[in-house]
Image (cartoon, rainbow, N blue to C red):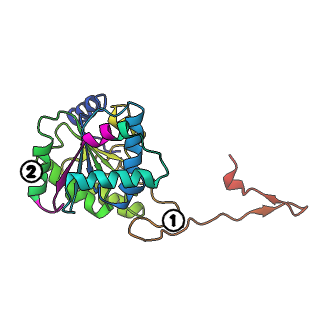
Amino acid sequence: MTTAAPEAEAQTTGQAQKPADVFVVFGITGDLAKVMTFHSLYRLEQRGLLDCPIVGVAVDDWTVDQLKDRARESIEGTGETIDEKVFDRFADRLSYVSGDFGDDATYERVAQAIDGAQTPVFYLEIPPFLFGRVVKGLHDAGLTKTGRVVVEKPFGHDRTSARELAAELLRSRAAPAVRLRVVGRRQLHGRRPRFQRADHGQRADVRRAPHAGRPDRTGRLPARAPRLPRRKTLAGSPKPHPRLVR
């Protein structure tokens, strides 16, 4: 098994123990933010667990007021009754950077928006094929030196594509900063995450592919896992296959 260099390992471990001082969401105008992210962040604000600015990044040419309106609509859409004082505190944390993920100038604007941040967390709720480009852009802008990158699942649509994606992240030279799967309270508050690092490809959590029969974000349906045959007893009742019995 290939592991990261000791320097990178020590640096990443030290960062994981510090809370985020800014939370940057790539793809904040998308469907996942609408149905989940805004509501989750609002609930953290409601519980007094959110204590950093939130910077949204997306290609849409929005203003901050439009982002705040989207946040309100999204939270109300989940059935949550909004506490205006809580929402005002949450909305005051929001800012927005518009830009193409393939444009280096976008990452320069992100750097300006989080200027002075020591432990930023970059949350990528975007399609998997954009992970490599965004991580490379963050790395080239010098934003992964002390920051952490969290990518939303699915990490590819099967084991092969997940390994290819892990290799692409490795080539960006920012792999030790990358975390797999969804962000939550643990990442914002610097606690040890429940997922593996994507360093050096071999350690990427390629097993966390979408469940069989469920489409990924690209609309592709993974092949169902083959089922083992079941034996029958003399009485005709089903009995677990011996390979399933430990």
- Residue 67 appears anywhere in the view: yes
Name which residue type carries label 2.
Answer: Glu
Question: Could you say which is closer to the camera, residue 4 or residue 20?
Answer: 20
Describe the element under mark 2 as helix, strand or loop. helix
Name which residue type carries label 1.
Answer: Arg
Question: Could you say which is closer to the camera, residue 159 or residue 51?
Answer: 51
Which residue matches tag 2? 108
Give the residue at the far right of this rendering.
235
First in sequence, mark 1 or 2: give its number.
Answer: 2
The answer to if 190 sits in the magenta stretch is no
* Residue 38: x %, y % from top left: 37, 48
Does the residue at mark 1 contact the one at mark 2 (Cβ under 8 Å)? no
* Residue 218: x %, y % from top left: 38, 69
State the separation of the CA atoms marked 1 and 2.
37 Å
- Residue 181 appears anywhere in the view: no
Instruction: Look at the picture and state if 243 lies above or below 86.
Output: below
Residues in magenta, as a range: 88-103
* Residue 210: x %, y % from top left: 47, 60
Question: Could you say which is closer to the camera, residue 211 or residue 103?
Answer: 103
| Residue at figure coordinates x 38%, y 55% from the top left | 73
